[in-house]
Amino acid sequence: MNKRWETYVTLSVAGIVLFTAIAIWIKILVLTAIPIGFLFGFFLQKGDLCGASAFSEVLVMRDRRKVAGLWVLITVAMLGFAVLDLLGWVVLNPKPFLYWNFLAGGILFGVGMVLAGGCVSGCLYKAAAGNLNSIVALLMIPAGVMLVEFGPLKSLHQTMKGYVLNTATGEKLSLQSLTGLPFWLWALVIAIVTAVIGFKRLSRNRTGPESERVAGSVAKRFMTRPWKPWHAGVAIGLLMVPAYLSSAASGRNYPLGVTHGVMQAELLLIDSNFNHVYQTTATAVSKAQGQSPTTPVLPTGKKVVWWLVLLVLSLMPGSWVAARLSGQAKLLPKPPDEVLFAALGGVLVGTGAALATGCVVGNIMSGWALLSIGTLFFGVVTILSNWAATYIYLMGRDLGA
């Protein structure tokens, strides 16, 4: 890209600094979701860190590098959350074990993302780079979410949410509540084990042939070449820390998530009468602390969480910049049958993610980092469903040919 890469990087950094400074200056912290979303999209694209391909490639290519990248992400985020918890800056909020939601949602989601060629975040960053299947799937994901949130599956969804597994004392099921061990101790032990295994693998890989050198400065290589999945995992794991602080300050006590942001962004175009959420209230604080709300909650319409909407809307420009820097931003036509399956996959992804109250980002990246037992269950169901669909749809089709 000659000198143009410097222009993209300079403008991106300037935008990140500007939006952050404005948000702090005018004290509307929900605007910090914009630089966070931009960086999230940038990191996802650089590492090609899509949950769908990460799980499928274990079977198709016998490649576990993206799965390892996801685990590094979760571990780094877990350490960051432990620090935030010890400092008292956030109230850790693991998801409840909604077993029917996680089972049904995980099955639909796992199958759907194979057909769509990506999970929700995967479709977002791949669509920004020009993948036609991802563009079509992304357009259909909100339809799947709305089937659950406002459509014929709403009653079933609400009924399923009534079946919850808690501890004997009524706490949400998490590794810390189940064992009585503090969150920071779990995070430390998991991080040490991960680091030991990771360093052993890196040492083993260094014994192989030296990788091809690429001309140019370190900065140019860093910005214009794809990253290893674990590099992107470290970057996103670190980003989780300011993301949690930003989200909590904006009326949403949870780290990264994208499913409902995609749906709500489209909802803003086709509906009206919204209950806008963009800052922390006394009610939100009391709920996060597990207390009864001090004031009545009186929603006046469909809820729109602006932190999620801004995160999703800024994720795609970040992905496009990363793809542009790497020379990957171009329209990728696909066969008509793949496009039709991608559309169906998009509906299944949206439906499954809505039933399970989250996707790879919300339930696996964020949920596992919070040590939520329910999201661990969702992850297992999703991975097994992904493998079944991968074997039938991807590998079976290749074998048949």
Image (cartoon, rainbow, N blue to C red):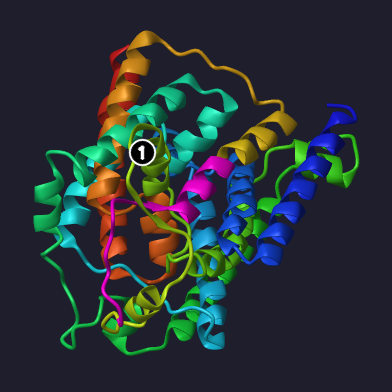
Q: From the top left corner, tell me how far across and down residue 285 is, in percent.
A: 40, 78
Front-lying residue, 272 or 144: 272
Q: From the top left corner, tell me how far across and down residue 37 is, in percent.
A: 58, 49
Residue 387 appearing in the image:
no
As drawn, 233 above or below 64: below
Residue at image mark 1: 267
Whether the magenta-drawn stretch holds residue 312 is answered as yes
Which residue is located at x 80 percent, y 48 percent?
Answer: 14
Q: Mark 1, residues whose alpha carbon is within 10 Å: few (<14), some, or many (≥20)?
A: some
Front-lying residue, 171 or 250: 250
Front-lying residue, 32 or 184: 32
Front-lying residue, 50 or 312: 312
Q: From the top left corner, tell me how far across and down residue 51 is, in percent.
A: 43, 44
Q: From the top left corner, tell me how far across and down residue 62 is, in percent.
A: 45, 39
Q: Please give left or right for residue 320 compared with residue 392 in the image.
A: right
Q: Quadrant of the C terminus?
A: top left
For the image shown, how many numbered marks are present on the structure?
1
As drawn, 289 above or below 214: below
As drawn, 72 above or below 177: above
Which residue is located at x 64 percent, y 43 percent?
Answer: 42
Magenta residue span: 294-315
Which residue is located at x 35 percent, y 81 percent?
Answer: 286
Q: In terms of image quadrants, where is residue 179?
A: bottom left
Which residue is located at x 34 percent, y 40 percent?
Answer: 272
The three-letter amino acid code for the residue at tag 1 is Leu
User: Of helix, strand and loop, which one carries label 1?
Assistant: helix
Q: Please give left or right for residue 95 compared with residue 4 in the image.
A: left
